[in-house]
Amino acid sequence: MLYMTLIICFALSVFITPFIKKFAFLIGATDRPNQRKVHQTVMPRLGGLAIYISFMIGMLLVHPVNQFSLAILVGSFIILITGILDDLFELSAKYKLIGQLAAACIVVFWGNLQVDFINLPFGGQLQFGFLSIPFTIIWIVGITNSINLIDGLDGLAAGVSSIALITISGMAIIQGNFYVMAVGLIVLTSTIGFLIYNFHPASIFMGDTGALFLGYIISVLSLLGYKNVTFISFVIPVIILAVPISDTFFAILRRVIHKKPLGAPDKQHLHHCMLRMGYSHRQTVLLIYAMSAFFGLIAVIYSQARIGGAIFLIAVVIIIIEIIAEKIGLVGRNYRPILNILQTLRTNTVKNR
């Protein structure tokens, strides 16, 4: 039944998207070009509605059930409405945050999804106590926004989300977690159907309707797969989502260093930097896909590693991310601490020969 449902979700997404495109133009849910945008023509938004409709039909057909199911669906509806309103009226960051917090609180308080503790690698537990609720809410809101922030090029957010969903679903299969696997694959096939129209050159954008929904679902599924587990396995979703998380982290760091408001828009995100380096639109998207797939593979390897190997992999991932950030100027042209150290070592080595 699941296999047939996945085919139906894919076909529905392919079939529905052209109608959503016409509907978006009809109601004025369009994205107009400006100095911050890459596209040059008026584009329909609201494409995420096709993903959501296909997802909901898939959920009705398979009907995967666990204790969090109803709360997740209600939360997803709230996040969908938030995205639709933003695509129509361009909500302020404050109102979007209210919608995201409402969706997260539904899952945390009604669904009782909380990360209560983490088993530490060398014995003992890290109990979150009263911080378990804010920690879980921050995770959901943070990941939701990180997917939204990378939605700057044709097919970028849809592709990165698909790669994350493939990894999360694959890990769920290994763990025997049917609910996470089923929901992840339903969202995945719905997203791939939409990606046919969204890959460069795109004929429709997913808008905040899609980006917020995908970020919300990915954040919740990653928690369902790894809550109340060891420190080592809790890092897995962080590695899976390394690209959007690191892009968000360096965006915050960049604004702090340059003393700008955290919500201030700019053209210094990962995809902007790569475009400035001379990569084409399609090359930039494919390279970021490759980065996401690389980190997904690292997450799978990491899940099977012993403590020593896992800690080594964490260190390697952090160093790789930092070097990439410095190389492409994610924080700024003068932010090069590791590259400067490497350059100093190289210079000293040459002098000593």
Image (spheres, rainbow, N blue to C red):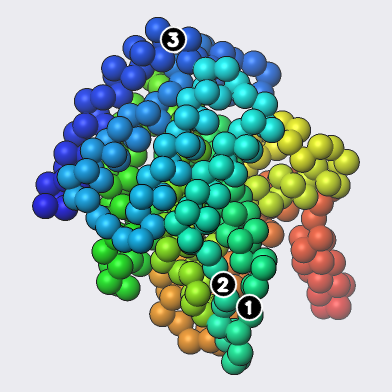
In this view, the residue in front, 30 or 115, is 115
Q: Residue 44: which quarter of the image?
A: top left
Callout 2 amino acid: Asp
Taking the image as shown, residue 226 lies to the left or right of residue 139, namely left
Q: Earlier in the sequence, mark 3 or mark 2?
A: 3
Considering the numbered disc 2 on the image, is that residue within a helix, a strand or a loop? Answer: loop
Residue found at the far front of this picture: 110
Q: Residue furthest top?
A: 26
Which residue is depicted at the point 32% across and 73% down?
175
The answer to which of 74 and 189 lies nearer the viewer is 74
Q: Residues within 10 Å of mark 1 (few under 14, many from 20)?
A: some
Q: For this view, does 305 lie left or right of residue 352?
A: left
Alpha carbon distance from label 3 to label 2: 44 Å
Which residue, given by chain and number where applicable, does mark 3 sit on? 27
x, y percentage for residue 130?
Answer: 67, 68
Disc marking residue 116: 2
- The answer to whether any part of residue 36 appears in the image is yes
Which residue is farthest bottom?
123
Tell whether 305 sits left or right of 325.
left
Residue 143: % across, % down: 56, 50
SS class of the residue under badge 1? strand
Q: What residue is disc 1 on? A: 127
First of labels 2, 1 by sequence position: 2
The reply to whether discs 1 and 3 touch (Cβ–Cβ < 8 Å) is no
Give me the residue at 22% from left, 51% from top.
63
Residue 299 lies, in percent from the top left, at 46, 68
Position of 237 relative to 75 (above/below): below
* 239 w.r.t. 96: above or below: below
* Residue type at numbered disc 1: Gln
CA separation in Å, label 2 and label 1: 6 Å
